[in-house]
Amino acid sequence: MPAIVPPARYGRFPAPPAPSDPPTARDIAMAAAYELNCTNAYWDGGARDVHVAETALYKYAILIAAAPQPEAPPPWFAQALEHAIRPVRDDIANLTNDMQAMKKDMEAVKSEVSLINKRQANTQRCAALAYNRTVQPGRAIPFEEVPFPDGTRPWGMMVNNEPLPELTSLEAVRTLSSRQSLEYHEGYYPEEAAPEDSMMREKAILLAIGVEPA
């Protein structure tokens, strides 16, 4: 450690002697007392600010030098630590692999569920189309709901905070607003541009739900 040089004497207070290496408790006490004396003299006009600063820095240097220095770990510590944490690291790696495998399994399950839902929607779609073909538009028997090709059930589906009407009759199709007609056409014919003519959209929607236009 470089030698710590005490500050020069200021006024009537003698400077502390050179500290031991490392500094002792007496060295710390004398440095603190010298700083206190110089500070008091500063308020009485007997010392300048630079004097107070030097005594404060001297005390700080003494405290730093007297503080216990951290001991270096023994040579065997790193190897022992590695031996201790290796099982934990292996467990984390195994857990990560298990979670990745679980994620793949979940994705496979989601794909299967999606496929089942599509098949169920197709079955419902075919059944509803077959039923609606047997219903005469002028009769009081309501049409069945026909899902969109992607499996979405449109009746009551919220669009712009409004539910789509249930297409239970020819009159229900004919009284669709322009926006509702566009929504139904886009749902049943997602890959086709909707006709601007409302009558053409009406005929296309009727065909999509299995009803022959009148």
Image: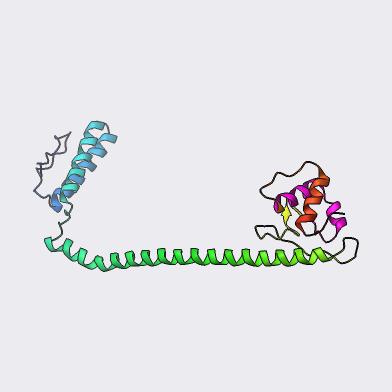
Coordinates of residue 164 in the picture (x, y in percent): 77, 55
Task: Please provide percent x and percent y for residue 135.
Answer: 84, 65
Q: Quadrant of residue 116?
A: bottom right
Q: Is residue 206 left or right of residue 102?
A: right
Number of marks in the image?
Answer: 0
User: Is any part of residue 58 visible from this angle?
Assistant: yes
Span highlighted in magenta in the image? 165-187
Residue 211 vs residue 149, the one in the foreground: 211
Which residue is at a point 18% across and 41% down the rendered structure image? 58
Q: Assign the magenta stretch its main secondary structure.
A: helix
Residue at image x 85%, y 60%?
A: 169
Q: Nearer the viewer, residue 26 or 164?
A: 164
Q: Is residue 33 visible?
A: no
Residue 52, image quadrant:
top left
Quadrant in which the C terminus is drawn: bottom right
The N terminus lies in quadrant = top left
Question: Does the magenta segment cover residue 131?
Answer: no
Q: Residue at x 15, y 59 (%)?
A: 73
Residue 201 lies, with reference to residue 76, above or below; the image says above
Which of 65/149 is in front?
A: 149
Q: Is residue 117 left or right of residue 99?
A: right
Image location of residue 41, percent across then percent down: 24, 36
